[in-house]
Every structure is written in structure tokens, then in C-alpha cells.
Amino acid sequence: MGVSSVQPATVQPSADHSLLKVEDLRTWFPVRRGFFSRVRDYVRAVDGVSFRIASGCTLGLVGESGCGKTTVGRTILRLIPATGGRVWFDGRDVFALGRSELRALRRQMQIIFQDPVGSLNPRMTVETIVGEALTVHGIARGRARRERVAELLERVGLSPSHMTRYPHEFSGGQRQRIGIARALALNPRLIVCDEPVSALDVSIQSQILNLLADLQDEMHLSYLFIAHNLAVVEHFSDDVAVMYLGRIVETATAREIYANPRHPYTQALLSAAPEPDPGRRRARVVLPGEVPSPIAPPPGCHFHPRCPLAVDTCRREAPALRQVTGAPPGHLAACHRAEELRPHLIEELLAVQTPSGLPR
Amino acid sequence: MSSEQTSPRSGAGGVAGAGPPSAAPVVGHGTAADGDVVLQVKDLRTWFYMEEGIAKAVDGVSWGLPRGKTLALVGESGCGKSVTALSIMRLVPDPPGRIVGGQVLLEGRDLLALAEAQMRRIRGNRIAMIFQEPMTSLNPVFTVGNQIVEAIELHQNIRGRAAWRLAVEMLQRVGIPAPAQRVHEYPHQLSGGMRQRVMIAMALSCHPDVLIADEPTTALDVTIQAQILDLLRKLQAETGMSILLITHDLGVVAEIADEVCVMYASRIVERAGVHELFGNPRHPYTRGLFRSMPRLAAHKDRLEVIPGSVPNPLHFPSGCKFHPRCALAPGCERCRSEDPPLVEHGPGHWVACWKADQASCR
């Protein structure tokens, strides 16, 4: 099914300096139903996603549950087979790699998971968890491995004496540090961070975010930072891509997308995010309806059933992700009416006066 | 504003209230002494007796929930906010948990002194509760309608078709489209946001005086979270119910709370009205929380951090439980040895910190 068998592993003659380049990525999951469990449908979890990440930079991938952001991360790492599209890592076609090449590449691409409990084997000591990859890849064993693990633990703010302990002896924040140490063990160049702080307490989140930022500076890491928290993504990312129902609907630099969002969904998301400021408790956007099923997405623009700006064209034609006229270069939006969208337009159109009555 | 008035307000057959012996006169618990308080918690202590020792999950917590208002208990995991809610409902798992002291006064009547049968008439009826994950609180093998009707029949003198009509009406009120069809669906057929709406419909079907909402939007997406917060506000305006909101999310607090109690390590460390608390946080922990949060359009390179992590209730530090993480504590003998009481530092603004006066605005 995948493209992996078709293309030889060519080195792409790339002009840009992207470390990671994703082109028209598609990941569909078959839905089997009925007699003989025939494939009746596909869940189009990722349906034509393209982006690139420059070396040492962070792309924030943001969206609500079910939008496909996690699937993007895992497909890139080939943890899930792709249905179509290409991924280039440092000029190499990731989907065309054979087993041994893939293994070599995996040293350079790592992942940090959301759940620091479920992603650490409870029967392994910290030394084994962090050092396992060193053994698997034949890099270090015995004393050399212990020394390397000690170094990694210190790097993430733990003590080398923690090596002999088990995951349950640590707090959530410390467990996430163990997960980060594990990801760093092989000196990767790209780390997919899948909701790395969502399960952590507020006071611990900032510790982990600062740690990830320090590591990026020191080791020149690139991050694909997947999260649903807009404030966290804005703080942490150079560029941001907003996903809705398997597609990227808007992308720009972090500052630009938050200052001047050009897709109605982005505007609604930003307005809906609760801000810790009761003085700005305002007529907020309450976006009607819910995310439709990715098995039968609406025709035309996926967002049109919830969009207050939808016109006939939106119901018929899926908008392409394109440069917004008048916006800085690189600000792309998939909306037929992106040029008409001034800041806060959606907020004004959807504003619901709070019944409890402003001002309080 | 002395908070140690022991007199229950209404004569709803309260248990002869030997109130807790008064502490120092000015040093109070930050309870609202004036106004119409529907639910009041006084010096609540809920401890868990574990093999490793006693975990004092809630240890001397007091507050009052004004009628028709929203009080938020905010804090990080393990601070005791959920155990406070379970204690009010008398749903603390026993063993190992036990409410070892204090009072929970619903319009003056101490719920902790009621017999279990009496408590059952309060629970779900006068005080209803919704939880973070609606799927685990709904029964997967019954339709949504069955479950709402069960609640209605259990608590109200309404039966059969009338109860079903009321169930449909409730679903409509919480904004579920096509309620007459949805009432026959099973929980798995509904989305997360719809399930939370069903929970709210069920909770409100008996017109409770108090709704306890334990992280009601934490499991939901941002746009759905906005819908649910909006719904809670709307229903509160319509019914006049009081809401006890339990959350870790200061954004949610800012959106719907009137009063806020910040909890840390089993105690309330700060209490104030929402505008006062967000505009002028006084406790170093509260201020640390605000500073460590990434904010939209803030463009800061580094986040400030609160060093260390939340202490284990089995091994609380001595003195002020926040002192090992506090920037003001080094060199302060009192912070290390004496637990600061909650003291009023401004009208309605209570802080449990020896150095609250030094703590400048954020």
C-alpha cells in the first residue's frame, strides 16, 4: 500500500536547508465492516499534509483531538505506515529506506510521548530504559553505557544515582525527564515531541519546556512539537501549523499566526482558549457543532459546516493551502476567503454575550 | 470579619454544633462571614491511613460558597482539591480514607453528621456532581435516557412518561440537538462534549442547590471546552445554582469563577475574589503559578519556574509546606518551622504566608 516499495532511496537534490521535508503525506486507516470484514471505508487521519522543518528550529503542530497531529508524527517516524506522500530527512527519502538504513536513521529521529507513565517500562531500571538504545545500536555496553547514562541523566536534571531505580519511584515531571534522556541517548537531530507537557502540572510544565529549549540550543535539535495548548505552542515554536480534520489549514511563524490569523478555524481556536485574565473575560467565540467524522468528511472545505463565513464555493471546492495575499511570505491558509479575514472577525460574528453578565 | 461564627444560618435541623474551638481571633479560615452562604466547609480534615503512614490529603480546609456564585478550588495534582469534593459528598473511599474532623454545612446542616440514608437524599439531589471523564461516570449498557430517568425517579416524585419527558427537556436545555432521538442512544454513540452535556443534564435534572464540577472541561477540546463553560454560565444564570469548580486550569478559573481558593499540599494558601487574586496574587506559590504559565502573545524566551515538585503527603516538609520551593523562604527560620495560618491581608483577601507583606505584585 505504501510508496515505500516503489521508489529507490535517492538523495534529493534539495536547494533548501530543511532537515525534514514532508510532502503530501497521507495516512488512512481502513475501516472493516460486515461479512468477510471487507474494507468499506478509510479514516483519513492525515490527508495531504506538507511542511518542512529547518535544522535547529521548531514547528508546532496544533489542533484538537482527532485532527491527525499525532498520526503525522508517528508516520514520519515510520511507526505507522504511510498511505501516500513523501518524507525527506536530510535529503533522504524516509519511506524508501530498507531495514538497516531505517535503523541507522532512527538514531537521528526520536520521540517523546505525552504519558510519562505508560511510555516507560515499569520493570526496567532507569539505566536500562535510557541505555537500551545504546545497546541495541551497538554503541556502548557495560561501564561505558553506565557512564553515558549518568551523563544523560545529569543533562536532563536528574542525578546519576537514580540509575538503579524504577519508574514508579519518580514524579510525573521526573519521568518525563527520563523519557527525554532516553530520546537523547543516540544524539538525535530531530525529536518528535508528542504533547510532552500536557500530562504535567503547571509548575512542572515550565521546567520541562525550559529544559527542551536548553537542549535545542546546546545540541542544535529540531523539534516537531505536537500539542493542543495554543499558549504552549506559541511560546515554544518558531513556526506553527494548525490542523483540522487531517489537513493543515494555516501555517505561519508563531508571532504572525497569533497576531494575524487568516483562517476562521484558527481565529475560533485562539478566541476559545481560556486566558488567565478575568479582566478580559469577554464575549467569547463559541464555535457551534463539533469536528465531523474523518470517515466521511464534509465536501468542499472541511470546516464549512461550522464556519460563519461559508459561501457556496466553500461547500463545493476544497481550498488549497496557499500564500495569503497581503500577508508576509510563508503565511499560508486553506480558506477561500482568507484575504477578507481581519483579526477578530470570527469573534465578532460568533460572539455570544455571557449570560452571567459582564461586567462582574 | 471574624470567620469563627459557629452559628449555622438556617434551622434545618443541624446537629447541635459544637463548633471547633476558636483559634486566634483575627486568624480565621477565610470563610465568607457575611452574605448568603449555601455550602460551608469548616476545618475539614480527611486523612488516608496507608501502610506507609498517614497521608493528610485535606488538612484544615475552610471556605464558604456564596449562593448563586462560583467558587473555584484550584491547585495541582495531589493538593487535596478532589478529596475535598469527595468529602463533601461523603464518597471518600473508606478504608483507607477517613474524614477525621471538621464540618460540611449545607444551609447550616452538617452533612458529616447525617445517617447514610439521609445523605443519600442529599447526594444527587441537593448537591450534584460532574466529573472530568464523562465516559467513566456513564453506564455503557444503558441508554442516556434510562440513566437520566433513573436519577429523576430516584429523587423526585415523577415517574414513567413524565420522567422521560423531563429527560428530553433536560437534554434540550443543555444544548443537545435532536434530544428526542438522542435520549435513546448509548453513551458510546455520543462525542466527549455531548457526554459531558448529558452528565450536566443528569446533574441538573433534580434542581440541585450546589453543583460540584470536578475538572469538567479538562478532557475536552478547546472549542468544546468553551461551549461547556458557556453552558454552565447560562444554566447558573437561569437556575441560580451555586457551583464548586475544581480545576488545575487558571484559564478556566478566570472564565467562570467569582471566588478562588488556591490549594497547596492539603491546605488553602490563598483565597480572594477572582479579580483580586489574578490582579494581586500575594502567596509566592500563586505568583509562581502565574509566572510559569506560557501565555498567548507574551513572547518570552524563558519561562520562570517553581523549582522542585509538589511534596508527597506522606512526607510533608515542616513549617510552611511550600518553603522548600519558595524564593522568600531561605534564611527564614519561621518559614521552616511554623505553618502559617490563613490571615486576611485585605478585604476578602486571605493569605497563608509569613512573608505575604513582602510579596510584591506580579
Image (cartoon, rainbow, N blue to C red):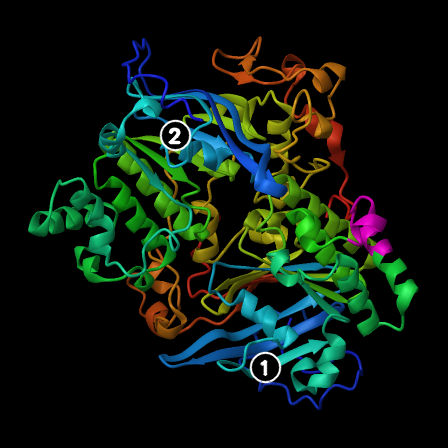
Amino acid type at image mark 2? Ile
Q: Is residue B90 above or below residue A194?
A: below
Q: Depth check: B205 or B187 in front? A: B187
Please tell me which residue is depicted at 71% across the width and 89% down the height of the picture: B15
Measured in 3D between alpha carbons, the distance from the residue under mark 2 to the one under mark 1, in whole angstroms, is 56 Å
Q: Which mark is residue B102?
A: 1
Q: Where residue B266 sits in the image (x, y, percent)? A: 48, 70
Magenta span has A166? no
Locate residue A51 relative to residue A141 in the image: left or right.
Answer: right
Query: What kind of element bears circle 1?
Result: strand
Which of the two marks, 2 or 1, is nearer to us in this view? 2
Q: Which residues are magenta?
A: B168-184
Q: Depth check: A137 or A39 in front? A: A39
Q: Where residue A60 sits in the image (x, y, percent)? A: 44, 31
Mark 1: give few (<14), some (14-19) or many (20+) Cα within 10 Å.
Answer: many
**Residue with the mark numbered 2:** A76
Query: What kind of element bears circle 2?
Result: helix
